[in-house]
């Protein structure tokens, strides 16, 4: 039964349908204003620290401003130049830090993707004993905080050492390789579940037709399944890359040599009681440099990322 329009002009104003939708629920003006106010409050809360950091980064003053400034008063690049020349007092250049971060993020992303796609294909296509139990075991690490797994991983990696005449020459824990292995272990559960959901949507008839034409299992996987899974593979790798680029906890716990530090570790090393001589503008410039590449890539590929995450949500 349709509601009777009110004779009060103010009530009619706030009940105007502003959604312009012919189907579904109407969106009255008061609800539209409420949603806009909520979005504006969220935007202000999110942008407040970002604008403050940007203001500090483009300032030539090394001390923190005495008043709250959210708009840059000057556009000085001296802090960025200092960070790119020599980030901290450690004898490590920015190029080395960038290389270490790229090795970890790209290497872990590719390794986890290679292992995950084969495991996801096995779970999606093969029926074997203990399949459901193994899927639960893959899912369990997603329920645990990453820091909760750091202690067993630390002990495991620290037990793998190489000695030469009683002298320690290699410790897997204190190396980028060890950190990469630990990070790959943490990235695999999500990658397996995300890829399995997409592989379930690929019609099995395509693989059966290829087998009838004489293709073996390897050819079906590499020439049929992988090309069709390219969108999900790209999204899974990119999401992993974003998380690994800014990963800090495992790297800080495992690594002790400055030559193996990453950009995220160096950013943290610029704060605290041992970094009193680090100017505020240099710290802010370093924060922007670390966050900018991933932020730009995410904004540019946001539609593809969201679309890729929903590819396996509905089975056709």
Image (cartoon, rainbow, N blue to C red):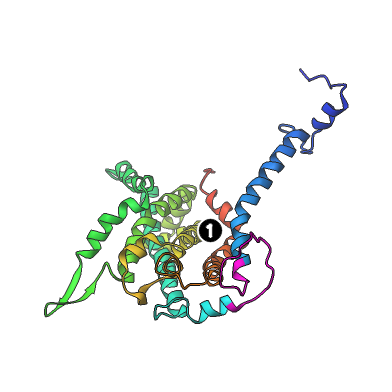
| Magenta range | 56-78
Spot occupied by residue 250 in the image (x, y as percentages of width and height): 35, 61
Looking at the image, residue 190 lies above or below residue 109: above
Disc 1: CA contacts within 10 A as few (<14), some (14-19) or many (>=20)? some
Evaluate whether residue 87 shows in this view. yes
Spot occupied by residue 34 in the image (x, y as percentages of width and height): 71, 37
Let me know if residue 68 is in the magenta part: yes
Looking at the image, the residue that sits furthest to the front is 66
Q: Residue at x 41, y 79 (%)?
A: 92
Q: Residue at x 43, y 65 (%)?
A: 268
Spot occupied by residue 175 in the image (x, y as percentages of width and height): 30, 71
Lateral position of residue 200 relative to residue 167, left or right: right
Looking at the image, residue 132 lies above or below residue 272: above
Read off the residue under disc 1: 231
Nearer-the-camera pick, 308 or 80:
80
Element assignment for label 1: helix
Lateral position of residue 94 relative to residue 10, left or right: left
Quarter in which the N terminus is drawn = top right
């Amino acid at each position: 039964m349709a509601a009777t329009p009110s004779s009060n002009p103010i009530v009619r104003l706030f009940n105007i349908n502003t959604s312009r939708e012919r189907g579904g629920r109407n969106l009255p003006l008061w609800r539209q204003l409420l949603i806009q106010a909520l979005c504006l409050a969220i935007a202000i809360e999110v942008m407040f620290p970002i604008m403050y950091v940007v203001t500090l980064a483009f300032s030539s003053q090394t001390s923190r401003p005495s008043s709250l400034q959210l708009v840059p008063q000057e556009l000085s690049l001296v802090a960025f130049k200092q960070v790119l020349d020599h980030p901290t007092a450690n004898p490590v250049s920015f190029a080395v830090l960038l290389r270490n971060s790229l090795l970890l993020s790209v290497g872990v992303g590719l390794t986890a993707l290679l292992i995950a796609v084969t495991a996801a294909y096995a779970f999606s296509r093969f029926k074997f004993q203990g399949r459901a139990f193994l899927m639960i075991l893959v899912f369990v690490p997603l329920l645990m905080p990453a820091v909760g797994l750091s202690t067993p991983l630390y002990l495991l990696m620290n037990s793998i050492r190489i000695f030469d005449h009683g002298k320690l020459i290699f410790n897997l824990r204190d190396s980028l390789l060890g950190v990469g292995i630990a990070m790959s272990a943490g990235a695999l559960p999500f990658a397996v579940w995300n890829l399995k959901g997409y592989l379930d949507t690929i019609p099995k008839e395509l693989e059966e037709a290829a087998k009838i034409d004489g293709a073996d299992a390897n050819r079906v996987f590499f020439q049929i399944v992988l090309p069709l899974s390219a969108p999900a593979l790209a999204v899974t790798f990119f999401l992993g890359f974003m998380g690994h680029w800014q990963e800090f906890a495992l790297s800080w716990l495992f690594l002790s040599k400055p030559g193996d530090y990453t950009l995220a570790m160096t950013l943290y090393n610029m704060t605290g009681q041992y970094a009193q001589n680090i100017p505020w503008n240099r710290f802010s410039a370093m924060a922007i440099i670390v966050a900018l590449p991933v932020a730009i890539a995410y904004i540019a590929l946001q539609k593809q990322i969201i679309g890729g995450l929903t590819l396996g949500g509905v089975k056709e």
